[in-house]
Image (cartoon, rainbow, N blue to C red):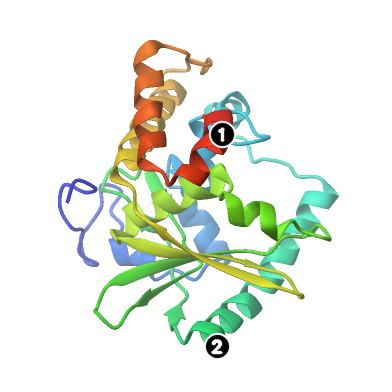
């Protein structure tokens, strides 16, 4: 498969002396997980911002954080959102399993390759009846009256990029995107998109080079980049194309 040059075994030793299993078996949201997470140039949740498709966070802001090795600060409201997610995700995963009959287990960080450029931490991983592994990503909106209808029409571009990154790192063909609130739960099946991932990886690699070389990113409107983007849009379901044009 094009996603990875070769499959990394759990016991393989990475350039930093750690084994892959040190990452994949680490429990999320622990001090050890946070420390291991810092080994990666980018995490899956940062990739959308790095390649410039996040709705509100810019690549330039992330560049300054990475190049100066700063720990991002968050407002009280954002911290409340993060705490809400940590509290509700286990509940959402339990309801997901009960509703679908699909069993999935917590997991750690999955390196994309042995260069430690990108690492992904899906909320859980499972294996279906055909022996196919899959990822589960859960979002628990903090704001009241979350618009499920709008999200059902088109997945948030940043979350789409995050899940494509997760699927590439874990080397799976699909995953489940779960949005949970106390009142309602939405479950969508998301498939790995090789065309989208080729573009995402290329742009992520460019961002990490810019950080290493201390070259701030600028918005690129070149013809070549536009052609790459069009290839992605053409590979997406029609209902998603219009929204994605606004964010890429």
Residue 53 image offset from top left, x and y in percent: 54, 33
Q: Secondary structure at mark 2?
A: helix
Task: Identify the residue at image location x=47%, y=75%.
Answer: 106
In depth, the one of 80 and 98 nearer the eye is: 98
- The structure residue drawn at horizontal position 47% and vertical position 62%, both measured from the top left corner, is 122
Q: Residues within 10 Å of mark 2 (few under 14, many from 20)?
A: few
Give the quarter of the image for residue 228.
top left
For label 1, the SS is: loop
Q: Is residue 216 above or below residue 91?
A: above
Q: Is residue 117 left or right of residue 83?
A: left
- Dot 1, crowdedness within 10 Å: few (<14), some or many (≥20)? few
Residue 65 horizontal side relative to residue 101, left or right: right
Q: Provide residue 149's location: percent of width, then percent of height.
A: 68, 57
Q: Name the mark on residue 98.
A: 2
The Cα–Cα distance between marks 1 and 2, rounded to whole angstroms, is 42 Å
- Is residue 63 visible in the rendered structure shown here? yes
Residue picked out by circle 1: 69
Q: Earlier in the sequence, mark 1 or mark 2?
A: 1
Image x and y of residue 50, in percent: 51, 33
On screen, residue 122 versus residue 29, left or right, reads left
> Which residue occupies the foreground of this view, 16 or 43?
43
């Amino acid at each position: 498969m094009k996603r990875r040059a070769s499959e990394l075994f759990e016991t393989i030793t990475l350039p930093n002396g750690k084994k892959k299993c040190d990452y994949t078996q680490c429990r999320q949201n622990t001090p050890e997980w946070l420390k291991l997470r810092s080994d990666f140039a980018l995490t899956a949740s940062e990739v959308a911002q790095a390649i410039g498709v996040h709705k509100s966070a810019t690549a330039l802001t992330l560049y300054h954080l990475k190049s100066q090795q700063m720990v991002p600060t968050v407002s009280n409201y954002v911290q409340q959102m993060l705490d809400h997610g940590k509290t509700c995700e286990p509940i959402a995963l339990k309801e997901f399993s009960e509703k679908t009959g699909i069993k999935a287990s917590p997991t750690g960080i999955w390196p994309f390759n042995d260069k430690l450029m990108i690492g992904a931490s899906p909320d859980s991983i499972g294996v279906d009846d055909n022996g196919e592994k899959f990822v589960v990503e859960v979002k628990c909106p903090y704001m009241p009256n979350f618009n499920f209808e709008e999200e059902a029409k088109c997945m948030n571009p940043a979350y789409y990029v995050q899940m494509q990154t997760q699927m590439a790192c874990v080397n799976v063909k699909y995953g489940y995107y779960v949005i949970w609130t106390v009142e309602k739960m939405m479950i969508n099946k998301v498939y790995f998109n090789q065309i989208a991932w080729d573009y995402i990886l290329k742009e992520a690699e460019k961002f990490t080079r810019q950080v290493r070389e201390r070259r701030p990113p600028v918005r690129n409107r070149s013809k070549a980049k536009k052609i790459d983007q069009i290839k992605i849009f053409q590979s997406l379901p029609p209902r998603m194309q219009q929204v994605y044009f606004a964010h890429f």
